[in-house]
Image (cartoon, grey):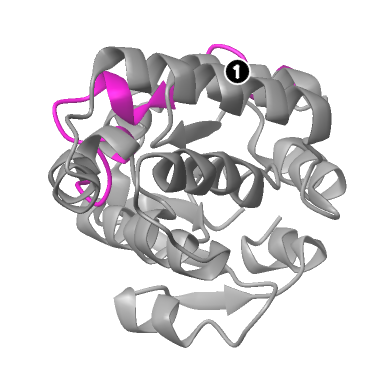
Amino acid sequence: MKFEAVLFDCDGVLVDSEPITNGVLRDMLEEGGWSLTPAECMRLFIGKAVRDERALIEARTGRPLTEDWMAEFYARRNRELTARLQAIAGVHEAVAAVHASAGQRMACASGADRFKVEMQLQQVGLMGYFEGRIFSGHEMPRSKPAPDVYLAAAAHLGADPRGCAVVEDTVTGVCAGVAAGATVFAYAPLDDGAALREAGAAQVFNHMRALPALLGC
């Protein structure tokens, strides 16, 4: 393998959760008076922690973002994910190939809360590859696009962040990986990934089957 360690984002990279989570968010924002199309909601919130967008949400709904609202969001989100979540196409084979080369030198570094990340990895059968090496942006001083979660993952693995590969799918996440000093590989299944390249991705790929070879596994 060409890298000291491989650090995977979760949502949109390992699991196809973003349309589900954003659908719940869109519904709840509409109930609060802010109507968005699914595409608009994805553009505004993909790759970001809802709490970090508090000012925007409060300005557009005219209501405070309360702990009760967040608790309802998490509950509705978790119900939908439990019912509908699937793994990204080809990711089991890709992760198995990377693991065969990297062993314990791989981790999951997500901007999401730990419960969600662990629930999702368990649900799609990927937990065994990452157990004990899962990092949540909610537990860091700053969430993505700050590099904190990737720096923490690299430190835990004893790797220089500059020698790590990061696998991401959003501009926010790519910026976090670049800020950490890592080489970022961006998964873009639906377009040419121009925005991801502009954010600093070293390479864009459109199917998980391509990832092991890109990483030198």
Horizontally, residue 87 falls left or right of residue 75, namely: right
SS type, badge 1: helix
Q: Nearer the viewer, residue 63 or 212?
A: 63
Vertical placement of residue 91 versus 209, above or below: above
Quadrant of the drawing holding the C terminus:
bottom right
Question: For the residue marked with disc 1, what is the amino acid?
Answer: Glu
Give the residue displayed 43% in from the left and 31% down from the top: 112
Q: Nearer the viewer, residue 203 or 169?
A: 169
Instruction: Tell me the magenta residue range.
Output: 128-150
Asked if residue 4 shows in the view, the reply is no
Horizontally, residue 50 falls left or right of residue 180, namely: right
Residue 40 occupies quadrant = bottom left
Instruction: Locate residue 167, reporting x and y percent.
Output: 53, 54
Give the labeled residue for mark 1: 118
Vertical placement of residue 46 versus 86, above or below: below
Give the residue displayed 79% in from the left and 42% down from the top: 87
Mark 1, other Cα within 10 Å: few <14 / some 14–19 / many ≥20: some
Instruction: Locate residue 187, reporting x and y percent.
Output: 60, 66
Give the residue displayed 29% in from the left and 28% down from the top: 152
Instruction: Locate residue 163, reporting x and y percent.
Output: 37, 52
Give the residue displayed 54% in from the left and 11% down from the top: 132
